[in-house]
Structures are given as C-alpha cells and as structure tokens.
Amino acid sequence: MLEPFKEPVFITKPLLPEIEELSAMLEAIWASNQLSNNGTMVKQLERELAGYLGSEQLSVFSNGTVALQIACRALRLSGEVITTPFTFAATVHSLMWSNIKPVFCDIEEDTFNINPDCIEALITQDTTAILPVHVFGRPCNVEKIQKIADKYGLKVLYDAAHTFGVKIDGKPVSAFGDVSMFSFHATKVYHTIEGGALTFNTPYLKERADLLRNFGILDTGTVMEPGTNGKLNEVQAAVGILLLKKVEAEIEGRKKATELYRKYLDNIPGITVSSDVEGVTHNYPYFVIKIDRDEYGLSCDEVFSKLKEYNVISRRYFYPLCSNFQCYRDIPSAAASRLPIANKVADSVLSLPLHGRLPADHVEKICDIIKGIRP
Ligand code: T4K
C-alpha cells in the first residue's frame, strides 16, 4: 500500500522569478515612481514578448479575460459567435459580456478542439466570428477554420490561453486568425501573476485595443469611445520580464515530466494519454488523461476522489461543460444531443499535476497510485 504524499501535490506550482532579481527591478520602479499606465516595464515586456511570440503587433493586458473582451470590441464582433463548450468559463463569458450570443459547436474526440466539420452548419446571417480554443496547448485545425472564415467573411479570434510559445510547422500560433489571446495567469506555463496578451494581424487592431484598454483615451483632450481599464502594471510587467528568461527551462521540465507520465501510464487498460503532434512545437501546459470507466473500472470523479486520498489534487478541466452552465443551458446550441463528443470528453478527462519542477519520483508515484487504485 502506497503512503499518501506528505504535502498536497497541486495541479501546478507557479514559476517564480529569483527574489533578488525582482528586488532590483522593484528598486528601479520605485525610483521611477511610474507604477502603471504604459510605463517602461510594460513597454519592455511588450517588445520582448513580440519577439518571443513572433508577432510584431502585440499588447499586454491586466488578464486574459479582459483581453478577450477587448478583442471582441476591437474586431467589432456582434450577433453570434461560434465557439466551443469545452473550455474555461472565461471564453464564453467574454462573448456574453460583449452582448454576443455564443453558439456552441461540438469538438473532436482526439484533440478536444472545436470540430471544423461541424462549424458550417451553425453559421447564420448573424454570425460574425469563430472563437476556437487551442485546448491544453494543442493547436486547432487552423487551416480548415480559416477556409471556413474566408468563405463566409468571418473573423477568427483564437483563445490561445494555453499556447504560449507553441508553433505549427515552425510558425507561431499567433500567425493564424485575426487576433489571438494568451493568458498570463499564475497557473500558466508563463505568467505575470495575472495578465494576458493579444496578438493582432494588423497594426490597426493593436491601435484600437490599446485605446480600449485605456478607457478609450487618445490624449488628454480626446476620448474616442467607451473603453475599459485593461492595463497591466509595472510590477507585474517586471515579473513577466524575469520569467521570460526562465520559460524555456520551465517548458523543458514540463516536457520531461510529460514523457515520464506517458511512459508509466502506458498500457493501463482504460487510460489514454495524448502524444505530441508531428510538426508542432509543444509547451506542455497540462497533463491530461482520458478515463474509460468501463475498461478502467472507475469514473473520472472516482479517480479524482481516490487521488485526493493520496494528497494528489487533480482537476476536472473542463467540467462542467460551458454549455451545461445554468446561464447557457437554455441556448438551443447548448443541447447535449447536439454536443455528444463534448459531453463525453468532459465526463472522462482529468488533468494531473504538472509543472517544470515536478520531481520525477512524484510523477512515478502518481502513476503507481493510478495503477494501484484500479479495482
Ligand atoms: N481561456 C482559457 C482557455 C483559459 O484556460 C483561461 C484561464 C482563460 C481563457 C482566462 O484567462 P485569465 O483571465 O485567467 O488570464 C485557473 C486559472 O485561474 C485560470 O487562469 C485558467 N484559465 C484555468 C484553467 O485555471 P482555477 O480556478 O482552476 O485555479 P485555482 O485557483 O484553483 O488554481 C489551481 C491550482 O494552482 C491550485 O490548487 C494551487 C495552484 N496555485 C494557484 C494559484 C492561483 C498556486 O500554487 N498558486 C497560485 O497563486 O482557474
């Protein structure tokens, strides 16, 4: 019988800058008295991120959710937007906050991403865009999605919250669609404690988003439109600048832990793990297993509870499905009968602890527990 972990092993452990380095940055901020409103640190971070993410047009925001809302405004989206129900609440909520009706589209069983083959049937006269999510860092079928968007004159706004640094055949994910949103929340591969970024395919969209994140103010005498406050502050930008130097090692550590998980979980009946996609440069944001209840003998919920007894705190990302939330379930496209794959996936997927500093023996023990609890 395995002993429980002495301390809880959480789904993630935030990457932290060296405290001495951060102190030096804080001293510079203190000396400057510039704490917010597009200061030196924010400008430096934007330059460095534009280089790292391979997008000339990039702006940072106070969080990914506000960034998505601003993207909806910058793109002048209205009416209906087709999106996935298998995502974090923020994706769909951002549409509702922008007075846009979400239209749910089913997903692919192997990638968990929006199924491009189901999109066209959902397009109406009111559709203005597609909002796909690169779920768990695995890129969507960007080419098929773009073809549909071009055919119907739709915008594509990618929720790229999980795909910091991901590339498709050497091209950064930000190269696809009109706008991409990256989340810099503390639980992400790369973060600014709270924060986010948008990348744009034209300078015009960046200009609009920059206005919108600063109340719509152009200059002291001119307010262009009702903007919001979506600014990142200087202290968070400093964290971001320091973590950019550590992110490669973090991704490498995550890759190693992912490979170990894959090795130890191989050949357990009823447990499926994902593999890398050819041509994709991955960033390993989550380690997800798919549980076949009949074959494995326990449901996702039961595995979650059993792991908790061993002090392993897994997460059922993304359960419940957004389409089953009280606030969305009455939308016609939210009917479970129209989203069979999404409902099946949400019932069977579990995220296990993963970060770049997760010790190999922790991974091994978590896998031993998963083997051991099987009835
Ligand atoms: N789109 C997608 C696809 C997203 O996944 C997200 C965010 C967004 C949009 C919106 O982006 P942001 O507006 O957040 O930038 C977390 C995050 O809060 C959220 O950012 C993330 N997705 C989502 C998938 O996960 P929770 O409710 O699961 O987080 P929480 O507080 O339970 O943290 C999980 C574990 O991480 C804790 O058990 C312990 C550890 N942790 C967490 C924090 C915050 C720490 O060790 N230290 C910490 O400071 O939502």
Image: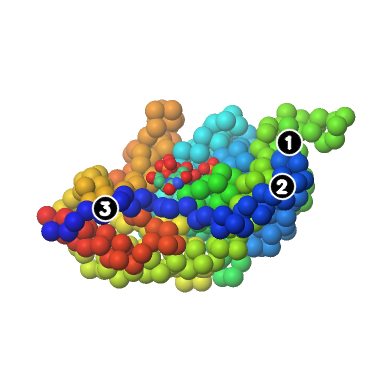
Q: Residues within 10 Å of mark 3 (few under 14, many from 20)?
A: few
Q: Identify which amino acid the numbered label 1 is placed on.
A: Asn
Q: Secondary structure at mark 3?
A: loop
Q: Is residue 293 left or right of residue 143?
A: left
Query: Which circle's residue, 1 or 2, is located before the other in the chain?
Result: 2
Q: Viewer-proximal residue, 1 or 328?
A: 1
Q: Viewer-proximal residue, 296 or 313?
A: 313
Nearest to the eye among marks 1 and 2: give it: 2
Q: Viewer-proximal residue, 102 or 59?
A: 59
**Relative vertical location of residue 273 with respect to residue 39 in this rendering, above or below:** below
Residue 187 rendering spot, x and y as whole percentages: 47, 49
Nearest to the eye among marks 3 and 1: give it: 3
Q: Identify which amino acid the numbered label 2 is placed on.
A: Ile
Residue 35 rendering spot, x and y as whole percentages: 71, 41
Say which residue label 1 marks: 214
Query: Which circle's residue, 3 or 2, is located before the other in the chain?
Result: 3
**Relative vertical location of residue 173 with respect to residue 197 in this rendering, above or below:** below
Residue 201 rendering spot, x and y as whole percentages: 70, 54
User: Quadrant of the rendered structure where residue 223 is?
Assistant: top right
Is residue 6 something one can see in this rendering? yes
Residue at left 68%, top 45%? 234
Q: Secondary structure at mark 2?
A: helix
Say which residue label 2 marks: 29
Q: Residues within 10 Å of mark 2 (few under 14, many from 20)?
A: some
Q: Is the N terminus in the top left, top right, bottom left or bottom right quadrant?
A: bottom left
Q: Residues within 10 Å of mark 1 (few under 14, many from 20)?
A: some
Q: Secondary structure at mark 1?
A: loop
CB at mark 3 closer than 8 A to ligand 1?
no
Q: Which mark is residue 6?
A: 3
Residue at left 60%, top 38%? 66
